Image: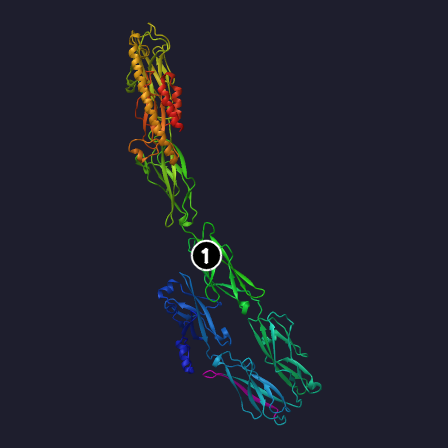
Amino acid sequence: MTKTIGYRDWRWQALWWHFFFLLWNTIDGQTRYTIPEELKQGSVVGHLAKDLGLGLSEIFDRKLRVASEAGKQYFSVDTGKGELVVNERIDREALCGQSASCVLPIQVVAEAPLQLHRIEVDIKDINDNSPTFQTTELHLKISESTIAGVRFPLENALDPDVGTNSLKSYTLSKDECFSLKVKDASSGRKIPELVLEKPLDREKKAMYELLLSALDGGNPVRSGISKIIVTVLDVNDNVPQFENNIYKTTIPENATKGSIICQVRATDIDEDLNGEITYSFGERTLDDVLASFDIDTVTGKIVLKGQLDYERFSNYEFDISAKDKGSPEMEGHCTVQVEVSDVNDNAPEITLTSKPSSVPENAAGGTVVALISAEDIDTGENGKVTLHLPKGIPFSLKPSFSNNYVLATSGVLDRESISEYNIEITATDSGSPPLTNSKTIPVSITDVNDNTPIFSQPSYNVYIKENGIAGSILYSVSASDLDLGENAKLSFSILDSKVQEVSVSSYVYINSENGSIYSMHSFDYEKLKVFQIQVQAKDHGSPSLSSNATVHVFILDQNDNAPYVIYPSSAVHGSLSQQRTSRSSKAGHLVTKVTAVDADSGHNAWISYRLAEATDASLFAVNLYTGEVRTKRAVSEQDDSSQRLLIEIKDDGDPVQSTTVTVSVLLEDGLHEPILDLRHKTDDSHKKTGRMALYLILSLASVSVLSLVTFLILAVKCLKSSRSSGSCCMRRSDSEDYKNPNRNLQLQLNTDGPIKYVEVLGGDMMSQSQSFRSCLSPTSEYSDFTFVKPSSTTDFKDMINVLDASLPDSTWTFESQQVRRGYLSLCET
């Protein structure tokens, strides 16, 4: 339903102007308001919020505003009341000229979410203009011989108003010789004509003054006046006559200067000068016509003088005068109508209705980025516009209504690949040839937290010396994040884990900002050799993302432990160790063996023995590596029965650590050596020795078989485990195996103490290991196989080779060799 404003009289109209009256209707989903022109600034056009279905709070929150399309902001939105109000003076004549309809389209934009509403405001005319004549005084020359009934065209008045407020009629002051007739032109104009009612007599009256009034149809009526002065001329009684009263022609707007528009022709039946005709434009021809056209005064050819523009003037209408050279001169008139045809001379224009919005990289398809309008001021096919986007970009254009479009996302966005798109929109019309125009719209892609931090290495190996200063830096890990801002800001932390049943946080701490790892206290290699730290890098995004890296910390040994004597055991307590030997001992006789250990490792644990002092340095010698004390020569009767030996024990570290042990050797007569008794039995005990050897062989064989079975079982388990974990491992039988199933089987040789032994270790480097030792008696060359509990780790195969090279061949029995081969076979597997 359409509502319009009614005007009964000027008093009612003034009342409506004061309080305003507007109505709206919806056509094809668009809102229309109707208002009179010249409303005061701030006058209400309509309740926009109500008509658009928006609450008052949404007006402010969604930033409802009017987008300007014509460079002037005629309307604005009152955000407090939700009303559309007048922002500038509206002059209907300036906007629409004398067009019957004056509809002003405006676009109302709401943000968050982005939405466009098209509003049409119909501007109604009010009678605010009076009819006016171009000249206030018109001079006419009429011959006295002119017969009654001849008409003389007068200047028509102009009224910018339209409809009932436009020019309606003319009146002429009373005179018995003249009357007024109004002719309706084909263009709709009313042309007044002065009609001679009876012949003139110059001798009676040579001049007439008449008043021509132009009246409009407004209420109250407005009028304009022009004074007509008629001068009566003598004789020349024939007026030039044109072949046509109206000449019509069409010319394209891109016609070149000098083009002939048309040619007018007039004839005069008089002779000589009274019949000679010159052509000219009418006296009241508009300046736009004079600037665009010219006429040949002799031939009557009208040529193009300036540049035509269909979008400015689509048609021209003007008068041509034909005057003879008589005395008085006579004048004839005709009308020329020129219609300008449109050509495709205007490229399309692209306008951003709203500023482009930033788009998050995880935006869903169809997210609105910007609102765009395209317009071509040409007509017909020349004004039809098509928009195009470049190929390969994740955006698309969707038509909204009229010439409006929505730029929206249509694909996956990745800020880390492309952080900003400069979208070139190309507009092409349908003319021939088509014209194009383009506009580049920058669209920035905002970051979301979709990238996890990346460490420079998946794992780090850190080597530090024991006994370091607490609080010293161990290492600095680094990580990076491809995101931006808070999403790329990283914090480092250490994940809680156990090191020897103690939280790793009691060993180290990390600087959360730069990833530097510091020690909480100094480390002791003899207590802890290696441990792991799980470092986590977490960004500050929401939700935050994180990744982990493993830092392997290896403690390097320092020579901070002196050798410790474990045999003779009495030397441990600082007392004098007494050993006995026979005076019948030969050169090379083993008197005793000094055994020491060093808690350090590597070179720091390599021990050497030296005889520092002796009662008789020529009688005894100490083996540099084994610590065996042997006689250098046979003992004689002259040697003192009490010999004192001071043995120095040094490691191979830097600086060297050493200790000493004092051994007292008593030389006695008739002392039997237990080792010789074991090696050389008398013939009387031969059977007993054979039985013991048999028992020993059976025992070793049993142990060997048991060991082989055990290692075969372990080998099968190792093979099964290696398929899943890629490492060879031994399973412990106690409950701890199930907590940490990947424990490496290791063998370690120890020949520094009074007992030569091989350690078979099960367990990783982070925990105490279960182990077994194959032990050899220090004073016996027989192979005693025992089981004890231990604690260190080393390379399994290397230890077997070292054991094989360091022990005498007699030490290894056939069964022992079988066990060794089983060890080596397991290691190679």
Magenta span contains residue 526: no
* Whole-percent x, y for residue 164 in the image: 47, 81
Residue located beneath label 1 in the image = 410
* Whole-percent x, y for residue 223 in the image: 50, 84
* In the foreground, 529 or 400: 400
User: In the picture, residue 760 is in which quadrant?
Assistant: top left
Does 358 sit above or below residue 203?
A: above
Relative placement, left or right, of 688 versus 413 is: left
Neighbour tally class for label 1: few under 14, some 14-19, many 20 plus, Cα within 10 Å: some
Instruction: Name the residue type under label 1.
Output: Ser
* Whole-percent x, y for residue 360 in the image: 42, 54
* In the foreground, 516 or 413: 413
User: In the picture, residue 757 is in which quadrant?
Assistant: top left
Magenta span contains residue 206: yes
User: In the picture, residue 80 is in which quadrant?
Assistant: bottom left
Does 500 sit above or below residue 311?
A: above
Residue interval drawn in magenta: 205-222
* Whole-percent x, y for residue 449 in the image: 40, 50
Relative placement, left or right, of 377 versus 763 is: right
Q: Specify the quadrant that holds the C terminus.
A: top left
Q: Is residue 154 in view?
A: yes
Does 815 sit above or below residue 117?
A: above
How many marks are shown on the rendered structure?
1
Q: Is residue 378 in view?
A: no
Relative placement, left or right, of 537 versus 188 is: left
Q: Specify the quadrant that holds the N terminus.
A: bottom left
Which element is circle 1 on? loop
